[in-house]
Image (spheres, helix red, strand yellow):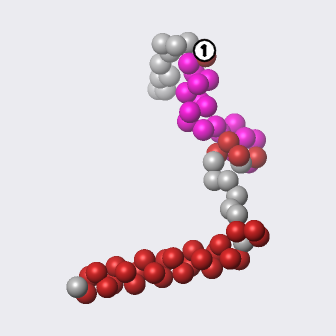
């Protein structure tokens, strides 16, 4: 029973912190966390794994990317 109450308390505290974060944000929205939406990542040439896979498949359907 103690574990159940402790778990409920931890979840309630987490939800309270999340509520504070949502209320403090403009219009309650968050910026995108996807790699393809980050300008800094695009500048470094870092892509989403799905985009990288698609790129490699365009080069050759059966290509294997080996790094030594």
Residue 49 vertical placement versus 54 (above, below): below
Magenta region: which residues? 40-57
Q: Is residue 45 shown left or right of residue 52?
A: right
User: Regarding mark 1 in the picture, which secondary structure is present there?
Assistant: helix
Q: Quadrant of residue 36?
A: top right
Residue 34 vertical placement versus 22 (above, below): above
Name the spot of residue 14 as percent of width and height, x first: 49, 77
Is residue 11 something one can see in this rendering?
yes
Q: Is residue 7 shown left or right of residue 33?
A: left
Mark 1 crowd level (few <14, some 14–19, many ≥20, 10 Å Cα)? few
Query: Which residue is painted at 45% across and 81% down in the image?
Result: 12
Query: Which image quadrant: the N terminus?
Result: bottom left
Query: Which residue is painted at 59% across and 30% down in the image?
Result: 52
Q: Quadrant of residue 42?
A: top right
**What is the tally of numbered marks visible in this picture?**
1
Pick whichever, 68 or 65, lies toward us. Answer: 65
Task: Return the residue at label 1.
Answer: 59
Query: Which residue is painted at 77% across and 70% down in the image?
Result: 26
Q: Is residue 53 shown left or right of residue 10?
A: right
Q: Magenta segment, principal secondary structure?
A: helix
Query: Which residue is painted at 47% across and 23% down in the image?
Result: 66
Name the spot of residue 49 as percent of width and height, x first: 55, 36
Name the spot of residue 55 as percent of width and height, x first: 62, 23
54 falls in the magenta region: yes
Q: Determine the residue located farthest toward the front in the rendered image.
A: 27
Residue 68 vertical placement versus 47 (above, below): above
Is residue 44 something one can see in this rendering?
no
45 falls in the magenta region: yes
């Amino acid at each position: 029973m103690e574990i159940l109450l402790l778990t409920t308390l931890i979840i309630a505290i987490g939800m309270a912190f999340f509520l504070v974060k949502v209320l403090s944000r403009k219009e309650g929205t968050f910026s995108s966390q996807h790699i393809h939406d980050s300008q800094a990542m695009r500048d470094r040439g870092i892509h989403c794994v799905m985009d990288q896979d698609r790129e490699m498949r365009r080069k050759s359907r059966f290509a294997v990317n080996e790094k030594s």
